Amino acid sequence: MFIGLDIGTSGVKAVLVNEAGAVVATAARELALSHPQPLWSEQDPDSWVEAAIGAVDDLAAARPGDVAAARGIGLSGQMHGATLLDTDGRPLRPAILWNDGRSHAECVELERRCSSLHAIAGNLAMPGFTAPKLLWVARHEPQVFKRVAKVLLPKAYVRYRLTGEMVEDMSDASGTLWLDVGQRRWSAELLQATGLDLHHMPRLVEGSEASATLAGEFAQRWGMAKNVVVAGGAGDNAASAIGLGAIAPGDAFLSLGTSGVIFRVTDKFAPAPALAVHAFCHALPGLWHQMGVMLSAAASLAWLSGVMATPTASLLAPLGDAVTGPGPVKFLPYLDGERTPHNDAAAAGAFIGLRGATGRDAIVQAVLEGVAFAARDNLAALGSASSAISEVDLVGGGSRSALWAQICADVLGIAVHRVEEGEVGAALGAARLGRLAARGENPAQVCTRPRRLATSTPNPSRAAAYDEAYQQWRKLYPALKEFSL
């Protein structure tokens, strides 16, 4: 048995995976977000630990014998979050998250300080990344910055609390702007640009390597053996790729989670910062990946659900499994700014085309289409960075919706496959990495592709109409940019 823990933004998911590779039990605990000021997004690091322990407690309560038989644990997590620890290993302040936009000025400063940033890190300086956050802390909270002994990412902090070891994997470390992504090692030059050095960083391992052993108190709590291996793990999207079996160059998927991602595996470090495309290490040695990232995908639908005080399923049900074509209302899904292709933390969401007769269904459709249009922006950026993508698997909470899958197929103009375990892809990938670390097996034998449940292909007439609608939609961001915060 193997356990995967996904430390997300809205919650922690835990999965229990058997020897055959099937998910036999799941558990989840919710997390709270804090937005104390505009553009700020923070979380209490200890809430991740409590939720992770609670989720495994739930698995153990439901399947005590199976949890006791677990021999490997893998961790996946939200990327970029700056978790600042003192010399005693305690958080100095709430973690500053991936969707926090306060450090836009520090991004400019970081690019000025380090002319080789793009070549080494493979990415633009964006507020979501970790390094600019530390420059912001140094400028605005200097007393906190002086006390920083270690900087960990969210899942690394959970690992530290579960094992006592401070370790990070290559894929998650790629999102800090401190990693030499091509060489898979910390860059002293990039660290120096933010007033840090190698002593502030955790030890690095590959995602499929053993990083530590589960602490005895937790092994005893869950009835496990004393030598349970904890894998290096992966950032959430790289972990999803492992869960999908996306481990060969060219493999691609679309994630409609809190954020949205189009992900493609590469066999070399292939940066394209001019297109705001991310180039990161994959969770397996010798592999990298490119990503186009939108900051508010399923989060846009969740936001609408909250505003309308209506469950998401109830919002979607009246629309059925397909629409006749583009709706009259347009939506910009920039509720938390945007990365690819705009790199604009101040970008704001908007509805365009509202009328007195506009009803709820038209607004819901606009949100689904707006996210799909943003995904097409990402697809275009990746296509410009290298070869075109011809099909994607669909994962994340948005993968539950056949309607959204069909809209994405019509907007993107490619086949979109809904797959088994699409909603637990990152946690499943983490469990697979836990297995690889514990067993040393061949990744190709463990990281198999899930069964495809349904395939949505572009409808020619709708795709043509969506192509025209997309061209009009693309004019909205530049027209409304001056009205952003």
Image: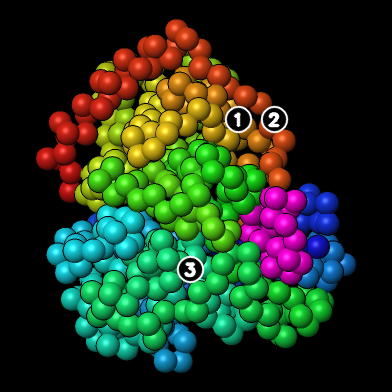
Mark 1 / mark 3, whichever is N-terminal: 3
List the residue tagged with mark 3.
Answer: 154
Specify whether residue 431 is painted magenta. yes
Q: Residue at x 35, y 17 (%)?
A: 467
Dot 2 surroundings within 10 Å: few (below 14), some, or many (20 or more)?
few
Q: Residue at x 78, y 83 (%)?
A: 226
List the residue tagged with mark 1.
Answer: 417
Q: Amino acid at mark 2?
A: Leu
How many tags in the picture? 3
Q: Amino acid at mark 1?
A: His
Question: Percent from the top left, x then y, of residue 240?
Answer: 58, 50
User: In the orientation shown, which residue stands out farthest toward the bottom?
Assistant: 88
Quadrant housing residue 427: bottom right
Dot 3 surroundings within 10 Å: few (below 14), some, or many (20 or more)?
many
Residue contact at pointers 2 and 1, CB within 8 angstroms: yes
Residue contact at pointers 1 and 3, CB within 8 angstroms: no
Specify whether residue 98 is painted magenta. no
List the residue tagged with mark 2.
Answer: 453
Asked if residue 169 can be seen in this view, the reply is yes
